[in-house]
Image (tube, rainbow, N blue to C red):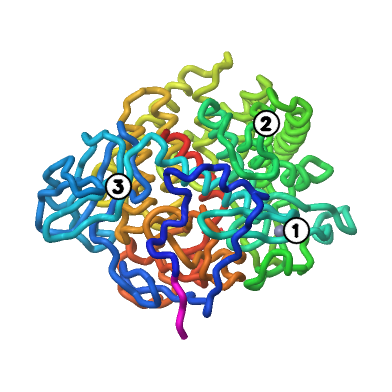
Amino acid sequence: MTMRHSTQPLRLGLGPLRSLSALLVGAASLTALPACDAAPTRGCPGTEIFIDGECVQPHMIRLNSVGYLPTRAKLASYVGDETSFQVMTREGRVVFEGSATTEVSARDSGERVRIADFSELEEPGEYWLEVPGVGRSPDFRIGDDVFHEPLVASLLALHGQRCGTAVELEWGEGTFKHAACHLEEAGLDYIDGEQGTKDATGGWHDAGDYGKYTVNGAFAVAFLLQAYEDFPDRLKDLELPIPERGGELPDILDEARFQLEWLLKMQLADGSVAHKVTAKNFEGNIMPEADHAPRFFVPAGTAATGTFAATLALAARVYEPFDPDFAATCLEAAQQAFDFLLENREDITPNQSDFRTGGYEAPGYDDERAWAAAELWETTGDPAALEEFELLARELGMSMLLNFDWSNSTNLALATYLRSEREGRDPDLVESIRATTLSTAQSLVENWKSHGYGRSVGSIYYWGINGVIARTAFNLVAAHRLDPDPTYLDAITGQLDHLFGRNPYGRSYLTGVGYRPPQFPHHRPSMASGGRFPWPGLLIGGPHSELFSDPAANVPEGLTWEDRAENYIHNEIAINWNTALVYALVAAE
Ligand code: 9MR
Ligand code: ZN
């Protein structure tokens, strides 16, 4: 079967000169998706990539193909004996010459790499890096605005996950759309004391599937709210081509509100919060509007109730200046959920045995309780919430996790308490949280410096690790608030370097952005439209300690990724990975 490939080079993004207004949804001429003869879903071995119908080896020089900020560190990695390297302008003029490090072991990809440091080059422009005998890197930019395009893309990607409404977005030459979906009410069959059905519309589809899961849904949107709270000046005027654009409420908070409105519908009469709303099985590879499988509320659990309480208490602070009524609604819901937790000290794990959709159980619920307490206290000053947080934090000896994900909210809890300006904190506890914040961030910095491809998490690999890598920006920001050492910021951009091409594949992990990004994400709307035209701005999960296609193959962990649509353990996308990336992109700037 032949395949038309028209996207070489695969840079579908805005490009530096293209104006945002050209992307506005509703613009007069919408381009149809290019035709496609087949739906290739295959992967390629090792670091090879699938281009024009075949597997080929990409560039051997791996760097941030999106670009570098002028004053931040600039590192590239390559395999080869030669140590001298040059950075050239697009016209081929040498602007920087340097000498790479001696070889560093990148044992997770079975390579020995050299690191080329060209941080001193600060002049904005378009460049490539060349190592004699090794080759030439993809083109990259240096500029203050290099992260604008991926930021817009990753926020638009969340917009594309909207459920219950029609969605249409443009990116590069493509238009990506789906009709209103999942409008039917969801069954209350599994909820004690309830019957019939209830509205569960709105919110974002979780990932490659169309389920909506409270724990991850709350955790994910919290990173947009946290980004706004930490960097309001950067975000208040950021324009997004979404229907609610403009007006007093910043566009990013319009997008977040879409998710929050759905979250509110997950709360039950006693203040507890339903764990998820999904069908009993994952959907087929169909567009969301074609999916009419009955959906059900799954019973409440402590994790859902805790993450809900925390996120809505945080939302109450963030929306207060713009919409006090909405803020009050969020706070009331958060308080009811928190009261439920205080009255029910026994943890509750929901029974999901009739469901084969995602579990999102987060056993060890104290961190969710602590996060809820910290956010409630920060929003209201309620001494009962402060007491609850401090009790849990002391009892558990809570310390910052180097790698953290949806199943553990410790870092969010500790960071909120630590940066609070409210009176009444326990000075010893503040001091110990300060120490763990700094020591964890120092480990992240050490890993960034010593790992061959700059991963802050070193050689840790599991499902969704790219999201975890992006999320380490949160810890680095927390440390930078305590100690304004710019190395923390270099480590943040270092994680973006990794995600945008300074990795063993030399490729961007964000669809539609950077050098040879993923083409076949495990994302139903992308798969349903033939698999050739992935929706933009989606961060894929990345290499994982487990293999998918050939479980017996002997492949180092760092080379397990496959750009293959069926492969959900490496090539799925998820809202919590995308919002972590949004946070990192905003923090980097
Ligand atoms: O991101 C989740 C990952 O941490 C888990 O290991 C994995 C298996 O439970 O589930 C991932 O989340 C998936 C969820 O269960 C269902 N929707 C897709 C999510 C992303 O792959
Ligand atoms: Zn939907």
Whole-angstrom CA distance, mark 3 to mark 1, is 41 Å
Q: Which residue is painted at 46% across and 71% down in the image? A: 564
In depth, the one of 557 and 139 nearer the eye is: 139
Query: Residue 458, how many percent across, how many down?
Result: 32, 49
Q: Quick check: 195 left or right of 471?
A: right
Q: Secondary structure at mark 2?
A: loop
Which mark is on residue 526?
none
The image shows residue 122, relative to residue 214, as above or below, that is above
- Return the residue at label 3: 454
> Is residue 407 in view?
no
Of badges 3 and 1, nearer the viewer stands 1
Residue type at numbered disc 2: Leu
Q: Quick check: 92 left or right of 564?
A: left
Query: Residue 213, how many percent across, how many down?
Result: 66, 53
In depth, the one of 219 and 74 nearer the eye is: 74
Q: Earlier in the sequence, mark 3 or mark 1?
A: 1
Q: Quick check: 173 left or right of 299?
A: left
Residue type at numbered disc 1: Ala
Residue 2 lies in the magenta-colored region: yes
* Quadrant location, the C terminus: top left
Ligand 2 lies under 8 Å from the Cβ of mark 2: no
Q: Which residues are magenta?
A: 1-5
Q: Earlier in the sequence, mark 2 or mark 3?
A: 2
Q: Which residue is painted at 60% across and 64% down in the image? A: 32
Q: Quick check: 379 left or right of 55?
A: right
The residue most toward the right is: 196
Query: Residue 471, how many percent across, how many down?
Result: 46, 43
- Return the residue at label 1: 180
Query: Residue 319, how many percent across, how many down?
Result: 68, 29
